[in-house]
Image: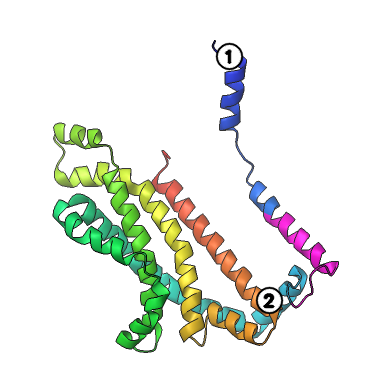
Amino acid sequence: MTEPRQTITNRVAFLEQRIPKYASVLGITGLLLLWEIICRLNIVPPLFLPAPSAILTDAWEMIATGELFKNLFASLYRVGIGYALGAVLGIVIGLILGFSRWTDAIVTPIVYSIYPIPKIALLPLIILWLGIGEMPKVTIIALGVFFPVVINTFSGVKNVDPILIKAAVTFGSSHANVIRKVILPGSLPMIFAGLKLAAGTSLLLLVSAEMIAAQQGIGAMVLHYGNLMITTKLMVGVLLLSLLGLLFNRGLQWLENKLLPWK
């Protein structure tokens, strides 16, 4: 028995309904208000969970002294270079693996065997190779970004509909045009999925590397204030990392919407 037309219409309307842009803001605001109430009622001691208002006060003080920006810029420099290097190399190698069967057969097993290794475990070895400085931290971030991007790019190329490729070839498209107009656009959703996944990984590796081998940066700042048990300033660093992760995700989502309007 078929469903009533009105029921089907209601289901379609439910699936197509638009969520207001302020919905995500309401979620974050509600969480912060609940956090503030819990702290004001002393349900959790301030040493273990400082109130958002106290964190904001210390954040303003750190901005006024320049400490926050100094550590922020150091971290942005490292993660920016490391992310760009890892993403570019990952996309290029992923496309090559997807196009070439020989390269796929030789290189793909190597990629999948190295991928599960925790990249931060390689930091002492990379410091031994590259010395103490910015290069080991940038390299470890680039490695962490490279693997999810190359795997997603490779999968995106392999999942392009072969019928579209055959149709383009049938209508006389050159090999370069097939890559540029069929394969690359078809693999972009998977490439962006890898870029978003790599954004979170890059921040995790950034903090870990800065805690081990850095004097400046958000990770070093969090470790410093953790050792001193100054949890308000420690939470400034944690919330700053959370904000960076949100901005990275929103920026990649905006770029994806521009490059993939059909999605």
| Marker disc for residue 5 | 1
- Asked whether residue 201 appears in the rendered view, the answer is yes
| Residue occupying the point 73% across, 72% down | 49
State the extent of the magenta-drawn residues as a range.
Answer: 28-47
Which three-letter amino acid code belongs to the residue tagged 2? Answer: Ala
Residue closer to the observer: 153 or 182 = 153
Above or below for 4 versus 208: above
Q: Position of residue 126 (x, y in %)?
A: 34, 82
Which three-letter amino acid code belongs to the residue tagged 1? Answer: Arg
Counting the numbered discs, the total is 2
Residue closer to the observer: 204 or 244 = 204
Q: Which residue is mark 2?
A: 59
Looking at the rendered image, the disc whose residue lies closer to the viewer, 1 or 2, is 1
Marks 1 and 2, Cα distance to the nearest angstrom?
57 Å
| Residue occupying the point 48% across, 84% down | 212
Above or below for 5 versus 209: above
Q: Position of residue 108 (x, y in %)?
A: 24, 58
Above or below for 209 versus 36: below
> Magenta includes 41?
yes
| Marker disc for residue 117 | none
Regarding mark 1 in the picture, which secondary structure is present there?
A: helix
Compare marks 1 and 2 and give the one earlier in the sequence.
1
Regarding mark 2 in the picture, which secondary structure is present there?
A: helix
| Residue occupying the point 51% across, 82% down | 211
Tell me if 240 is positioned left or right of 125 in this view: right
Q: Residues within 10 Å of mark 2 (few under 14, many from 20)?
A: many
Q: Position of residue 252 (x, y in %)?
A: 46, 55
